[in-house]
Amino acid sequence: MSDSLVIIPTYNEKENIEQIIREIFSLDKSFHILIIDDDSPDGTADIVRKLQKYHAEKLQLMCRHGKLGLGTAYLEGFKYALKRKYEFIYEMDADFSHSPKDLIRLWKACHEEGYDMAIGSRYKTGVNVVNWPIGRVLISYFASRYVQFITGMPINDATAGFKCYRRKVLQTINLDKIKFIGYAFQIEMKFKAWKHGFKITEVPIIFINRERGTSKMSTRIFSEAVFGVMKMKIYSWFHKYPQAYH
């Protein structure tokens, strides 16, 4: 039994899914994987089912009907992980923008260095993004600076989607009260972990834009993040967050 579960939401990832699974399973540390597929018409789930024949316990699949959103996929995955007693729970993309090798670095930050959340950060040491159009880099970078300014969080990459949580973080945050489903979901989870007083670190990574498949990014997702941050901050003025450490 592994202490770690990697949650990977998918929608039309047939070009990447088998390779990302195989690379995670080839790492020196044992990780289990939960694929959450939103009814991909390209047969992503069928590929995962075939691989399950060889990795029965390590590879798990959750199929949902309809394209229900990134945030709801992770929330279902978190509840699944907590129910099955995983100690370290990860968010990760299927398209190799996040390197599987960096999973071990995130695990070490939590397991060996004592952090409660480790963020794979594109902006901890400058701008470490490969193959993104300059306009998208600027939007992403300044969105994180905007979040820092509004919320006060000392986090350089507020919209990062590559993270490791200790289970106690997800147990403390009321997952049923998470409001956002796009990139604002990533911000909200960090914000609530920070407000609860958990120990958070950023692990520098190199983010590589997908080489295969189609990006799911849209201007609607970014607008949700921009306006959602203001709503989230205002809400926090009237809400108490029990502290993880006293």
Image: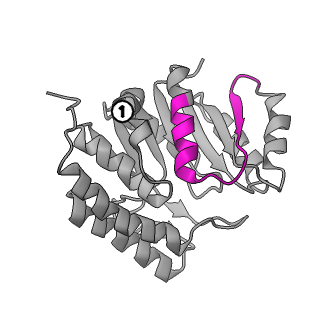
User: Which residue appears farthest toward the left when viewing the image?
Assistant: 246
Q: Position of residue 19 (x, y in %)?
A: 74, 48
The residue lying at 76 percent from left, 24 percent from top is: 56
Residue 153 in sight: no
Residue 71: in magenta span: yes
The residue lying at 51 percent from left, 74 percent from top is: 219
> In the figure, 101 relative to 126: above or below?
above
In the image, taking residue 246 as reference, residue 127 lies left or right, namely right
**Where, quadrant-wise, is the N terminus in this rendering?**
top right
The residue lying at 22 percent from left, 37 percent from top is: 241
Q: Position of residue 161 (x, y in %)?
A: 48, 53
> 62 and 180: which one is in front?
180
| Residue identifier under label 1 | 169
Residue 58: in magenta span: yes
In the image, taking residue 245 as reference, residue 58 lies left or right, namely right
The residue lying at 36 percent from left, 58 percent from top is: 158
> 64 and 137: which one is in front?
64
- Tag 1: amino acid: Val
Q: Position of residue 74 (x, y in %)?
A: 54, 43
> 75 and 59: which one is in front?
75
Task: Check the image and tell me how it is coloured.
Answer: one colour
Local SS, label 1: helix
Start and end of the magenta stretch? Answer: 56-79
In the image, taking residue 129 as reference, residue 158 lies left or right, namely left
Q: For the image shown, how many numbered marks are present on the structure?
A: 1
Q: Position of residue 99 (x, y in %)?
A: 57, 51
